Image (cartoon, helix red, strand yellow):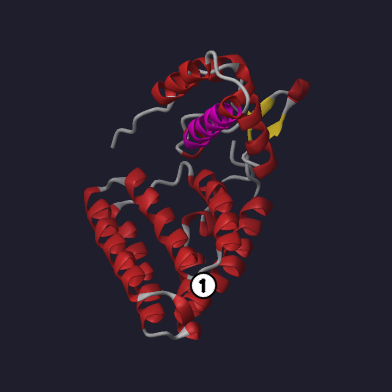
Amino acid sequence: MERAGPAGPARSLAKEMVGSEGTTTMVARGRLTDLAYQHVRERIVRGELPIGTPLGEAELAEAVGSSRTPVRQALGRLLQEGLVELGARRQVVVRGFTLEHRAEILKLREALEGVAVQRACEVIEVAEIDQLRLLLIRQRRAARDGAHDVFLDLDEEFHLKIAEGARLPILHGFLGQLRGFVRVARLGSERPPSVLAKVVAEHERIVDAIERREPAAALEALTAHLYKSDYAIAPHRTKVAR
């Protein structure tokens, strides 16, 4: 599944900035920062920038098609989120994850998503449950085709859609940030179609409980799902992901 890189839109925005000033310049620069952020984050979570990779501003600016300032600001955001860290000589590098980090991710997901599924049982609308069902259909197709990256995108969309339906925008933002950690922690653990099909079945049990408006059952289904996650049961393979 090919994705259009942000270089084209970024270059167009850069042209818009020429000769502009005041608010227009600030808005355009902010959009360039967002594009740079999405570009680098996407490459990190897809493993295109492996753990430990130095992130040079000049090279990234050239790839994005902007000046170094938006890239510097984007790296600052990623540093705050924890997807990158300062390495030797204070150079920004893609962060690795220890067993302790993986355990923390699991506990945070259990706490935050537990709140989301229980709240969703109370307030989610029928049309949003239908959207979750459609995501399950797309997940089954991706699982059958062995489209791992597509499946991961749909998996992320599924969990965030529940938080959206729960009407918890702050929690939704936290989960969006946490999903980056989930994706990086999963790198190198590609799952066969049979395992992906089991994940879809686990998702379906969560949706079934939400549709029945049963918070306890939804929480139980979510917890069982999380503790079967590949990054939750497979980190014994390596002390630190590097």
Residue 189 within the magenta-colored segment of the rendering: no
Q: Viewed as shown, does residue 139 lie left or right of 101?
A: left
Q: Nearer the viewer, residue 176 or 189?
A: 176
Estimate the x, y position of residue 2 in percent, counting from the top left. Answer: 30, 33
> Which residue sits at x=54%, y=13%?
19
Q: Which residues are magenta?
A: 26-42
| Quarter of the image that includes the N terminus | top left
Q: Viewed as shown, does residue 214 lie left or right of 175?
A: left
SS label for mark 1: helix
Q: Residues within 10 Å of mark 1 (few under 14, many from 20)?
A: some
> Which residue sits at x=39%, y=46%?
190
Question: Is residue 101 among the parts visible in the rendering?
Answer: yes
- Figure quadrant of residue 203: bottom left
Q: Nearer the viewer, residue 139 or 101?
A: 139
Q: Nearer the viewer, residue 181 or 99?
A: 181
Q: Which residue is mark 1?
A: 223
The three-letter amino acid code for the residue at tag 1 is Thr
Question: Is residue 84 among the parts visible in the rendering?
Answer: no
Q: Main secondary structure of the magenta part?
A: helix
